[in-house]
Image (spheres, rainbow, N blue to C red):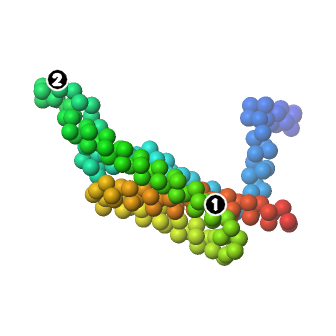
Amino acid sequence: SSEEAQSTERAVLRMAVPGSEQSRAAAALVPAVVWRAMAVQFWSYFGWFCTFVYWSDWAGADVLGGSPDPVDSTVADAGGFGGDNDSRQLFEHGVRVANAGLCIMALLSIPLSVLLPPLLRVRQGMLRVLWVTGMTALAAILACTILARTQRDVVLLSTVLAIPLSVTFTIPWTVVTTAAARQHLR
């Protein structure tokens, strides 16, 4: 019968995709605020991914004007592509400067991330304001990369990234756990 066929089909689907029905049921229970937090985090993690992957290359090539091309005198002498030694050293120096800035950013974000939760407990209404401010700061800092011209600019931009890093890695967890606690109390 048709009903038996549908039942068999559902059983086969459950075996093919274990937990799919449970996943859909669980997703239906997730509060809307958590879905919004996930959407915002998706885009912020996209920005962070691009930053962490390309930051040092950007500093070496775009800010300091170096070339990542390996030095190959035979290719360069033949009129092909091959970086000169000075350009390669300039690029490597820019990469080191950027990595130093990212290290300072990471070290500074540790105390900021520790201080944010107690601050948020004191100022409950500041959660969304701080989150929006942190996301806006991330966008503004990334937009300012166009203006960077010196090593100092690279280190400064890298260092101030600690603020949005702390915000985007701390506040969403606060939002999600607060929503979960409210859902649990209902």
Measured as percent of width and height from the top left, residue 79 is found at: 12, 29
Q: Secondary structure at mark 2?
A: helix
Between 157 and 53, the one lying in front of the other is 157
Left or right of 164 on screen, residue 9: right
- Which class describes the residues within 10 Å of circle 2: few (<14), some (14-19), or many (20+)? few
Sequence-wise first label, 2 or 1: 2
Where the C terminus falls, by quadrant? bottom right
Image quadrant in which you'd find residue 128: bottom right
Measured as percent of width and height from the top left, residue 86 is found at: 20, 39
- Label 2: which residue? 74
Residue drawn 55% across and 57% down? Answer: 109
Where the N terminus falls, by quadrant? top right
- Label 1: which residue? 114
Image quadrant in which you'd find residue 111: bottom right
- Which class describes the residues within 10 Å of circle 1: few (<14), some (14-19), or many (20+)? few
Q: Secondary structure at mark 1?
A: helix
In this rendering, does residue 21 appear at all?
yes
Image vertical order of residue 123 relative to residue 7, above or below? below
Residue drawn 42% across and 52% down? Answer: 101
How many labels sit on residues?
A: 2
From this viewpoint, which residue is outermost toward the top?
74
Image vertical order of residue 133 relative to residue 87, above or below? below
Measured as percent of width and height from the top left, residue 117 is found at: 67, 65
Between 4 and 10, the one lying in front of the other is 10
Left or right of 32 on screen, residue 90: left
Residue drawn 21% across and 35% down? Answer: 85
Q: Amino acid at mark 1?
A: Val
